[in-house]
Image: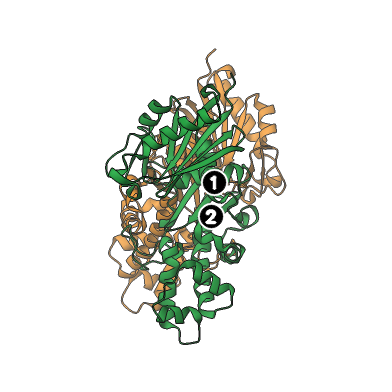
Chain colours: A orange, B green
Amino acid sequence: MAKDKLIGVDLGGTTIKFAILTDAGEIQQKWSIKTNIFDEGSHIVPDIIASINHHLDLYQLDRERVIGIGMGTPGTVNRETGTVTGAFNLNWKTEQPVKADIEAGTGLPLTLDNDANAAALGEAWKGAGNNDKDVSFVTLGTGVGGGLVANGQLIHGTAGAGGEVGHVVVEPNGYLCTCGNRGCLEQYASATGVVHLAQDFSEAYVGSSKLKQLISDGDEVTSKIVFDLAKDGDFLANEVVDKVAYYLGYATAAMSNILNPSAVVIGGGVAAAGEFLRARVEKNWQTFAFPTVRTSTRVKLAELGNDAGVIGAASLARA
Amino acid sequence: MAKDKLIGVDLGGTTIKFAILTDAGEIQQKWSIKTNIFDEGSHIVPDIIASINHHLDLYQLDRERVIGIGMGTPGTVNRETGTVTGAFNLNWKTEQPVKADIEAGTGLPLTLDNDANAAALGEAWKGAGNNDKDVSFVTLGTGVGGGLVANGQLIHGTAGAGGEVGHVVVEPNGYLCTCGNRGCLEQYASATGVVHLAQDFSEAYVGSSKLKQLISDGDEVTSKIVFDLAKDGDFLANEVVDKVAYYLGYATAAMSNILNPSAVVIGGGVAAAGEFLRARVEKNWQTFAFPTVRTSTRVKLAELGNDAGVIGAASLARA
């Protein structure tokens, strides 16, 4: 029987997303379950195994047709041993033998990588990357992550820290980062970074602004509120967005001069601001991009949304 | 007959270096000829062909044993067509069908890449890179070039501009670069960049300094003189070297956070300053490198000197 199906798993702290895809990357079935992080996350792997086995039966899909399972996970992945460490949002405090357990429980081969890399592969394959072999993906969420595809392969580097675009320093002696350094992109372009900038700019701003009002009143301010106010013309909010776009343009240009990808793809919650953000990032990026890069690399928005994770995970199983 | 020999060619504006190597990268024969750039560089390719044919005869090396020729060249290489454009130091004003001509003239397959990429492959294979599959090479000469190896392959990017580390912006609104942007690393860490910084620092410096004296007297100042004076304890020269090391540390750290290579290898004429420069670059690099990168990537000096080009060029023929 010809092997022509892939299974993608996108493991997150709240939900686990699954999909069955053709080997051409078309999603045929999609489902999800809640992530049970109780008992040190010990239910997670058994739940994944049970859910895959159940759905293979449900859809009467012969295991012989499955090329393999690919999975994106939080934490640090050891791709040689197939284990995961430091996935704190899953309550995984010790090294987890994820690959061995899932392969034993399903009878199918598993390929693991981290969630940002999986999403990058998804966008590179079926999203904004148009299946090109050189695509850089930056995701703006709680943190800023990166997944870099060059010559058709993910850049893992020697210790798995390849793609740490969120820790490129954009402001020497800037905001202190959780990594211990100062001025990392993550401190300016993540959801919390945007709010941090808004608070600092608000203190120094004396004009009239809805954003300043909210901050002065102690109301909750999110990055979405900052972008929405900027779109409505709030001056202070626009100053904040301009600064975020400056740092993003600067860091993605440095990355582009190093990798010259066909596309820099921006995704994640903060990128929900859409073209409003992309256009401003691109304007700054053009200032810092090498001329050949400026004409051959494009700054794009992610296209797959929540599906990037399962599609990219599935593509891991193709290799 | 087993194919077990490689031929490497390092084409430069002054000399053309050649080597015959084993397929394990050991140099067995080495020679060079002057580059004849007269008549729009039209003698260069015929000279290369004649020199290879002559030496194969001289050493009585059967062509059947040669896997292929690899060559590093100035200019922009189109790897699909095997042509070179824009090699101004060779007087090549039009597109040159280098691959077709050399293959026809020698009867051997030719693989072409640019000279910085060839040197990077050399250092990655037989030099400071220890044959690791993730090695980043930065060369500090008249300009600043880069050659980046990830997953065992050179990063060319979508239009061949991958590895333009010299055009990562390290000082927004800084010195105007030949590329049209401002503040590129090349303007601070190339031989001319070091002298430019020395001139600027000298104007603002009021203390006693041999370097300031030389500049004030209108004597010729080279980057070598700046480094030699710094080693001798000249205060102003040390200020200049510190600034160069800061920019190099900053840019190579950004590159390291993106690629997490096992080694950042620094070569080229300016790197002849040796450990004196390397140690200062590393100190700055540590400030900007992500913690996992700081412990897994090393900042090293190039080890092959002038041989990097022919060895790396030869390795191009292996693929």
Q: Amino acid under label 2?
A: Gly
Residue B308: mark in rendering: 1
Is residue B79 positioned above or below A65 on the image? below
Task: Specify the quadrant that holds the N terminus of chain A.
Answer: top right
- In the image, B45 versus A257, the foreground residue is B45
> What residue is rendered at 54% in x and 67% in y?
A182
Please state the horizontal and vertical placement of residue A269, each as a whole percent of the image: 44, 51
Residue B267: mark in rendering: 2
Please state the horizontal and vertical placement of residue B233, each as a whole percent of the image: 58, 78
Q: Residue furthest front?
A: B58
- In the image, A261 versus B27, the foreground residue is B27
Q: Is residue A254 visible?
A: yes
Task: Specify the quadrant that holds the C terminus of chain A.
Answer: top right
Chain containing mark 2: B
Please state the horizontal and vertical placement of residue B78, each as a whole percent of the image: 36, 37
Is residue B171 positioned above or below A132 on the image? below
> What residue is rendered at 45% in x and 33% in y?
B111
Horizontally, residue A182 falls left or right of residue A49, namely left
Q: Quadrant of residue A279?
A: bottom left
Horizontally, residue A6 falls left or right of residue A209, namely right
Chain containing mark 1: B
- In the image, B205 versus B59, the foreground residue is B59
Please, what secondary structure does the residue beneath circle 2 have?
A: strand
Please, what secondary structure does the residue beneath circle 1 have?
A: helix
Q: Amino acid under label 1?
A: Ala
Q: State which tag comes first along the sequence, 2 or 1.
A: 2
Is residue B71 positioned above or below A86 on the image? above
